[in-house]
Amino acid sequence: MRSEWAAEITARAQAHWTPARLAQLSRDKTLLLPPVQAAPLLRAMSLLAADGSMRPDRVRKYLQINHMVAMLGPSLRELRASRATVRLIDAACGRSYLALLLAWCFRNLWSHPVEVLGVDRNADLVARCRNDAQLAGLDDVVKHEASALDAIDVRAAWARAFGSRATIDGVVALHACDTATDDAIVLAVSVEAQLCAVAPCCHAELARAWSELAETGSESPLAPIFRVPHLRREAAATITDTMRSLLLRGAGYEVWPLEFVPSEHTPKNTLIRAMKRSGADEGALSEYRALVAASGGRTIALDARIRS
């Protein structure tokens, strides 16, 4: 039975996580997800081993998700203060780490009702996520839908998952690959979600455009960057995230681009956190157009999609 399994993994975690090991893990930081108290969840997420320990590669993922929830703290507090039940979509959820972690925190730390829908195009992965949610004891508040983000009917999917249509309060995405981060942003804007939070992963759209400019002998001041693959990738990632931030501001969001986690954990360490505040910000759109002109004249597809 699940209750016996949960009690057993909790006992193993308690035996393993001595005060010295906990101090080494936390490095004097507060952990939202204590490895003993959250042992069934962490085991369901494959972050804890069967003996209650945590491998080094799992430690990095564990610290990432702890830190992301901490970075979302101000926005999540705002949602809890204004919503009787907070409703979130974990876009391109993968193994659904973020969905499960958020649901656990809402239930065990904040005692606030929550519903989370994880969406991923990989049906086999979605089936595994459903099993993980059951093991974690969160399958009543965490549901999953197999769908591409750019094809999902959110209202219908929510009704299938939770039995009713509802206003979506937030869209989050942790390292959604390539264009999936932009899909998550478009989804948040289209459903008028109060919170949009994305930690982008690889996205080569602007770098490809710059490579084409390099081949044509661009006279842009940035041409030396366009010609060098490594510099082109690094600069394009930063400029892309700046463009995303400006387009979100243009859509009426207050935006905070933040360091997600220290670079020793992952090179993909930017979190774009945004809260809906008002109507379109024409000043941000003017800044976006100026940035496009200054960086070779190439836009990103999000430009047209977010305003369609």
Image: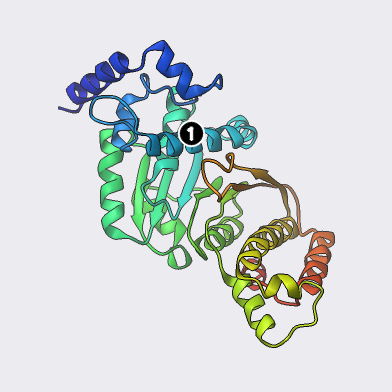
Give the residue at the far left of this rendering.
1
Examine the image and state in which quarter residue 50 appears. Answer: top left
x, y (%) of residue 180? 50, 62
Residue at which label 1 appears:
63
Quadrant in the picture for the C terminus: bottom right
**Is the N terminus in the top left, top right, bottom left or bottom right quadrant?**
top left
Scheme of colours in the image: rainbow
Q: Position of residue 18 (x, y in %)?
A: 37, 13
Q: Residue furthest top?
A: 19
Q: Is residue 14 left or right of residue 191?
A: left
Residue 96 appears in the rendering:
yes
Q: Residue at x 38, y 57 (%)?
A: 120
Residue at 64% in and 43% down: 259
Q: In the picture provided, is 130 more to the left or to the right than 224?
A: left
In the rendered image, the vertical position of residue 262 relative to residue 144, given as above or below: above
Q: Amino acid at mark 1?
A: Leu
**Which residue occupies the foreground of this view, 138 or 8?**
8
The structure residue drawn at horizontal position 27% and vertical position 31%, both measured from the top left corner, is 49
Choose between 30 and 161: the one closer to the eye: 30
For the residue pair 189 and 92, the one nearer the viewer reads as 92
